[in-house]
């Protein structure tokens, strides 16, 4: 538990570290008994020419998992990294503290209300993974339905990837996978008895379940039969099926697929899904092209959709710039950025579904319209207003404000066309998540669906700063820190950023970062371009050929924190995960002098080869393809491996990967590690942390995440010169 004593005990460490010279930050020789050096990757150049530019890849062989050098390289790097991280004097204590803090927090991943039953997906305090429970009424006692921890087989753990209860709550469909692979097998449970129905449906990685109104079956997406895992065809030509309860999957009805209907165009990378709901006799089919935000929608009668018949009428195509929808009865609601960078809301009827005839019912505003949710009493409007969540409701009387209990960010908003009001999960940097039930009259009732953690946050505060990018753009950067922190440039900073797909980096309460702040550190988040914090334009300014703005913004935020006296040179660790690996990787190669440490978690590093990985084709809309000249130019600029320069004094670098990662192939981190280890002249550590029982992190257990974050914090403090975190 965080107390005044622990705050005072850690107050002096940052100031002492700030007195050390940069030479004191260099990595000393490994202590006796440690592995002296990581394995050296063999160099086997492959040179290609793209539009007149020759590009050499020294480590193309790493893309072949069957290469005899691949596993020895990864295991050798893993052993070396583990030895170096374990030798950090303060790491064991950091591991214990991070675990204590994360164990204090109960996290709710989602809720669903079905009549009198309330389903809650949560990771209880102290638990290692998310489970699914049900209670009778909001205040009723919980009964656990699915606990993946109980399925653990030796070192192999399972994860609950997704779930959806039938409208009456009689059944729940859910996906389980091993080792964070996300290779889900779909199951169905009878809720009252807990009995699991006999069907087991594989290839259900992104099932996108939607139950029929009578609960007799559901629509779901399934990957193509015979698709080879690891190939670029793996995610192509998936199919939306209708499955009836207690039947074999071989009897499923093909409801939507490529080439099935002559008037419905489905590309090979689009994931088709069909949505149905009680109280409506229509079905809406959505085609989701990988990471592309713009969607294609069709409408049909529910009867036709259930029988696999045609009759689909197009609502919109990607050029209509629709990014989300909701429906209630035969009313359809669309969110679009056509003519509105910060989005607007449209309405149409199923009988005349073409978007060209839709009426604008929610005009563009200063805040970004993030979603429209259909409830019985109103259409609720979810907004992001300069980093703060806002909620409005649309009724026949117009648009009105819904007062929220405090300024924060939504961890989720849940509405049901058959119920009045909504549930909101609200949190901030310094306020733990709380779930409120907001009734039709606007009253907010705090529920007990998530327990309050015994963590004292009174000693912490947050504020929002604005850095100026090289083109003059103001870039927000949020900082969280101890209220008694001296603003003397001595504080180490852990600066995170993402910047892709229009995804927002919004405030959240993460107890693990308290372990960083207890040592006088600042937790910071840069809202770099490529996200959606200011609408579609903000996304476009960090996409394709504009991608350099993303890491340029990261650099500007780091420089601003130094200029304003929050931290000093070589006191900043930058962190990014997945597509955020582009952000930190190119920040590293552009400004190696600016950072004390760079931490890339399951990060994309080799963009020129990304489209040839398993998850490559669905990402082409966001990053481009080497088959076009502009695509090549953009990808070359993003590729961190191609910008590593021999003889450069790079800061300490920690890269992580999971060997079952279905989204970012492990060779991204491996190639970047090999490049940096061969090039750096600083003598600082370049470590590749490998988890053989994990993937992209979505299915990792709490213990796995605790160990990883403790390693990240310990590495950052080591590189920042904290005396308590130097190698023993």
Image (cartoon, grey):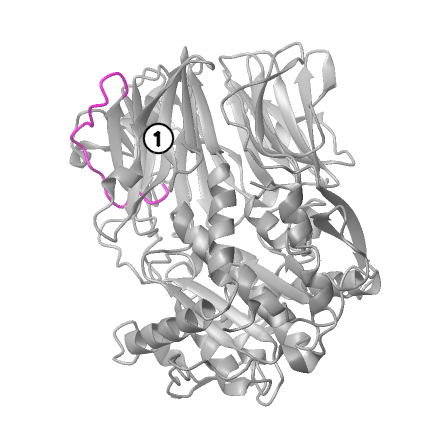
Q: How far across and how far down the image is residue 698, in percent?
A: 42, 48
Quarter occupied by residue 410? top right
Q: Is residue 116 above or below residue 457?
A: above
Q: Nearer the viewer, residue 251 or 442?
A: 442
Snapshot quadrant of residue 126: top left
Name above or below for residue 20 compared with residue 133.
below
Judge by depth and name the residue closer to the eye, 484 or 405: 484
Regarding mark 1 in the picture, which secondary structure is present there? Answer: loop
Q: Taken as a whole, is the magenta stretch helix, strand or loop?
A: loop
- Across and down, in percent, residue 22 comes to 70, 79
Which residue is pictured at 21% across the width and 51% down the height?
154
Instruction: Tell me if residue 502 can be seen.
Output: no
User: For the residue carrying disc 1, how many other residues have a C-alpha within 10 Å: few (<14), some (14-19), or many (20+)?
Assistant: some
Image coordinates of residue 639 in percent, x first then y, are 55, 72
User: Residue at 57% of width from left, 19% of height from top?
Assistant: 422
Q: Nearer the viewer, residue 234 or 589?
A: 589
Whether 385 is among the magenta residues is: no
Q: Which residue is pictured at 26% across the width and 55% down the height? A: 227
Q: Is residue 96 above or below residue 452?
A: below
Q: Is residue 196 magenta?
A: yes
Q: Which residues are magenta?
A: 191-206
Please tell me which residue is depicted at 22% across the width and 18% down the height of the picture: 193
Q: Which residue is mark 1?
A: 310
The number of numbered discs placed on residues in the rendered structure image is 1
Residue 363: % across, % down: 74, 30
Question: Does residue 424 appear to the left or right of 93 in the view shown?
Answer: right
**Quadrant in which the N terminus is drawn:** top right
> Can residue 364 be spotted in the picture?
yes
């Amino acid at each position: 538990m965080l107390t005044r004593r622990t705050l005072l005990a850690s107050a002096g460490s940052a100031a002492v570290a700030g007195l050390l010279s940069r030479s004191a930050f260099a990595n000393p020789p490994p202590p006796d008994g440690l592995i002296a050096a990581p394995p050296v990757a063999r160099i086997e150049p492959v040179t290609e020419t793209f539009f007149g530019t020759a590009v050499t890849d020294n480590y193309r062989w790493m893309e072949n998992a069957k290469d005899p050098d691949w596993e020895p390289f990864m295991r050798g790097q893993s052993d070396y990294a583990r030895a170096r991280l374990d030798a950090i004097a303060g790491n064991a204590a950091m591991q214990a503290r991070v675990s204590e803090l994360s164990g204090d927090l109960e996290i709710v991943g989602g809720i669903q209300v079905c009549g009198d039953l309330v389903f809650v997906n949560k990771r209880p305090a102290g638990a290692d993974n998310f489970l699914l429970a049900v209670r009778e009424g909001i205040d009723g006692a919980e009964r656990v339905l699915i606990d993946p921890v109980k399925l653990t087989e030796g070192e192999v753990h399972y994860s609950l990837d997704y779930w959806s209860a039938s409208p009456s709550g009689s059944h729940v469909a859910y996906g389980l996978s091993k080792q964070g692979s996300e290779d889900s097998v779909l199951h169905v449970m009878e809720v009252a008895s807990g009995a699991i129905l006999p069907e087991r449906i594989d290839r259900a990685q992104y099932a996108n379940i939607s139950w029929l109104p009578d609960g007799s079956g559901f629509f779901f997406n399934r990957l193509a039969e015979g698709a080879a895992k690891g190939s670029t065809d793996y995610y192509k030509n998936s199919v939306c099926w209708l499955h009836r309860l207690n039947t074999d999957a071989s009897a499923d009805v093909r409801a939507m697929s490529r080439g099935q209907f002559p008037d419905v165009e489905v590309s090979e990378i689009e994931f088709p899904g069909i949505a149905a709901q009680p109280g409506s006799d229509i079905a809406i089919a959505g085609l989701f092209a990988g990471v592309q935000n713009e969607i294609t929608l069709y409408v049909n009668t529910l009867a036709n959709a259930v029988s696999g018949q045609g009759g689909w009428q197009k609502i919109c195509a990607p050029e209509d710039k629709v990014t989300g929808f909701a429906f209630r009865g035969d009313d359809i609601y669309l969110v679009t950025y056509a003519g509105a960078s910060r989005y607007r809301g449209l309405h149409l009827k199923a009988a005349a579904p073409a978007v060209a005839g839709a009426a604008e019912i929610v005009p563009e505003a200063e805040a970004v319209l993030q979603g429209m949710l259909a409830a019985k009493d109103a259409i609720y409007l979810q907004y992001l207003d300069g980093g703060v969540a806002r909620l409005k409701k649309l009724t026949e009387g117009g648009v009105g404000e819904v007062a929220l209990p405090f300024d924060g960010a939504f961890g989720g908003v849940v509405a049901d066309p058959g119920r009045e009001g909504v549930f909101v999960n609200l949190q901030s940097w310094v306020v733990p998540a709380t779930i409120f039930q907001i009734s039709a009259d606007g009253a907010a009732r705090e529920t007990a669906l998530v327990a309050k953690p015994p963590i004292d946050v009174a000693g912490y505060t947050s504020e929002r700063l604005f850095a100026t990018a090289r083109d003059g753009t103001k870039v927000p950067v949020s900082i969280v820190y101890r209220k008694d922190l001296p603003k003397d440039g001595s504080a180490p900073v852990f600066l995170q950023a993402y910047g892709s797909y229009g995804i927002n980096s919004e405030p959240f309460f993460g107890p693990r970062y308290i372990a960083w702040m207890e040592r006088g550190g600042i937790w910071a988040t840069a809202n770099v371009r490529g996200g959606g914090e200011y609408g579609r334009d903000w996304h476009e300014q960090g996409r394709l050929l504009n991608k350099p703005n993303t890491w340029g913004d990261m650099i500007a935020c780091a420089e601003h924190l130094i200029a304003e006296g929050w931290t000093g040179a070589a006191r900043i660790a930058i962190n990014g995960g997945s597509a955020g690996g582009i952000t930190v990787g190119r920040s590293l190669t552009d400004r190696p002098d600016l950072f004390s440490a760079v931490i890339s978690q399951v990060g994309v590093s080799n963009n020129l080869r990304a489209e040839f990985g398993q998850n490559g084709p669905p990402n082409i809309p966001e990053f481009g393809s080497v088959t076009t000249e502009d695509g090549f130019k953009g990808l070359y600029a993003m590729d961190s491996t191609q910008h590593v320069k021999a003889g450069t004094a790079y800061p300490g670098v920690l890269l992580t990967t999971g060997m079952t990662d279905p989204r970012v192939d492990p060779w991204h981190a491996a190639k970047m590690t090999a490049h940096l280890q061969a090039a750096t002249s600083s003598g600082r550590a370049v470590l590749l942390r490998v988890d053989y029982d994990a993937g992209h992190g979505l299915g990792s257990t709490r213990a796995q995440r605790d160990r990883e974050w403790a390693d990240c914090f310990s590495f950052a403090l080591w590189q920042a010169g904290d005396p308590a975190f130097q190698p023993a």
